[in-house]
Amino acid sequence: MDPVVATLTILALAVVAFVSNRVPIAVIAVGVSLLLFFTGVLTLPEALAGFGDPTVLFIAGLFVVSEALDATGVTAWAGKQVITRAGTGRVRLIVAIGFVVAIASALISINGAVAALVPLVVVVAARAGMPPSQLLMPLAFLASAGSLLALTGTPVNIIVSDVAAQNGGRAFGYFEFALVGIPLVLASVAVVVLLGKPLLPVREAVRLPTDLAQHARVLREQYDVTLDTGTLLGPASGVTEVVIAPRSPLIGTTVAPGMTTPDGELIVLAARRGEQILKAGDILVQAGDALLLQGTWDALTVRTASGGMLPVDAPAQLRRSVPLGRGAKRAVAVLAVMVVLLATGVVPAAAAALLAAVALILSRAISVPQAFQSISWTTIVLIAGMIPLSTAFIQTGTADLVAGWVLAAMSGASAHVVLLALCLLTLVLGQLISNAATVLIVAPIAVSIAATLDLSVMPFMMALTVAGAAAFLTPIATPANLMVMEPGGYRFGDYWRLGLPLSALFIAFAVLYVPLVWPF
């Protein structure tokens, strides 16, 4: 098969598979790499090169850093300091939320920032007498805008920086993205303030995240525990409610309030059987009994994961809501060093991120299992599998061919109009498939067009980054959009209403503003 035909066929199959949502994303990505090899488009080392690409390793390291900041409560603490001081006014809350999530997204990723701040925003909305649906979608959308403040904001930033450096341009500086990110964040906040109230639904949540303070009060009341809230849920230790599972090995054993487990790691604070609180004397454990256990967060996480106990609320999730937990200072210190290394370019980006990940594990800010579990392997495999397709586009001349089609269809059009066409293509694909996969597909075409027109590749790459971040029209466009769907009580058709004006804003910045800063 002709290499160009094979490449275009593989691309078409991949897009159809992505859009169908019936094939796992990782399977599609690996399938792309294998098809490129079996059709003879690439050699086996070329087809698998993405799995050892420094970009992929850089992104993996950033996932670990993000996990450390979330798990130790740094993100929750930072959000609480700003958002709870904003008062109860809608405009002030949106500005505060935008500020916090933008900074957090730039440093630790969109998904990590949104996941950490959703519970806080829900609590703040309740205290302000507002439905969470008025604040949670802005949280997700402003996180996407904030991802354009720094290199670490999103994998797309890293991809376009590498593509620019490999095709006649240069790598973007760590904070260079902020030249477009800062005005875009400010403009996005203004759009949400002006249009959010009429365009966002007023709806109750389907499922609310845990309010930590309220959770502690409920446990105290239901178990008649006299310990104060801070003792129940603190930075180093906490409590977890567990239910004795059927066929649990604990059935028939004897416990008593105040006793410790045989290994000494946990304390049984209280027990319930149905509506009855079992406070005194020995208790013969039965299936369905509820126990309130206290211990370090690590011990609670490990011990409640086995032994026939079913945790009502996972300790690992409760721990994330506790501001500045164990290891927080170490996590912040490691983040600061990593940012300095990335900003100065003293070491390659991948090396800086991997050094940070290793430092977090060695300093015990997070454990090795935590580090591995924090990595979004779907994202890693997706990018690693799609990088060879981008390579094939260039090596086979497919990118030049498609670029020729685009230029022929737009004969005589200005550079801005051509850039607009590429950004609209990126916008549309980005609503259906991963924005990282979208940019890996469109970037080689943009590079070829820039070369054909004898223009700088820099504005094209930065414009693709901005357009790729405008994934606002559907809940499936980004994981962050999905994260707020249930807590906000949103429906599929709610997203495009506010998403459409924001998408138009992002496209306008990509086509009109970006070339002013990075000239053609």
Image (cartoon, rainbow, N blue to C red):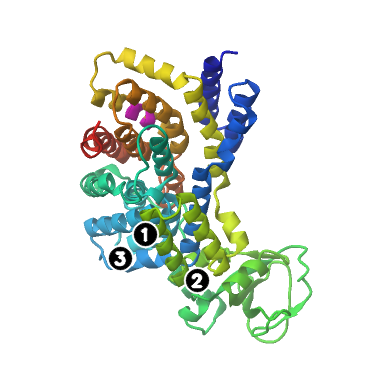
Q: Secondary structure at mark 1?
A: helix
- The reply to whether discs 3 and 2 touch (Cβ–Cβ < 8 Å) is no
Q: Which residues are magenta?
A: 422-427
Residue occupied by mark 3? 82
| Cα–Cα gap, marks 3 and 2 | 22 Å
Q: Secondary structure at mark 3?
A: helix
Between discs 2 and 1, the one toward the N terminus? 1
Residue 501 part of the magenta segment:
no
User: Dot 1: within a 10 Å radius of its alpha carbon, few (fewer than 14), some, or many (20 or more) residues?
Assistant: many
Q: Is residue 11 above or below residue 201?
A: above
Which residue lies at the image location 37% right of the left edge and 42% below the top edge?
Answer: 171
Per the rendering, the mark at residue 261 is: none
Which residue lies at the image location 36% right of the left edge and 46% below the top edge?
Answer: 144
- The reply to whether discs 1 and 3 touch (Cβ–Cβ < 8 Å) is no
In which quadrant is the C terminus drawn?
top left
Q: Name the spot of residue 355 as percent of width and height, x first.
A: 51, 59
User: Dot 3: within a 10 Å radius of its alpha carbon, few (fewer than 14), some, or many (20 or more) residues?
Assistant: some
Q: Nearer the viewer, mark 1 or mark 3?
A: 3
- Which amino acid, by three-letter code, is at mark 3? Val
| Left or right: 174 in relation to 440 | left
| Cα–Cα gap, marks 1 and 3 | 11 Å
Residue occupied by mark 1? 121
| Left or right: 381 in relation to 447 | right
Q: Is residue 289 above or below residue 46?
A: below
Which residue lies at the image location 69% right of the left edge and 83% below the top edge?
Answer: 256
Whether residue 131 is visible here, answered yes or no, is no
Q: Name the spot of residue 35 as percent of width and height, x first.
A: 62, 25
Q: Nearer the viewer, mark 3 or mark 2?
A: 2
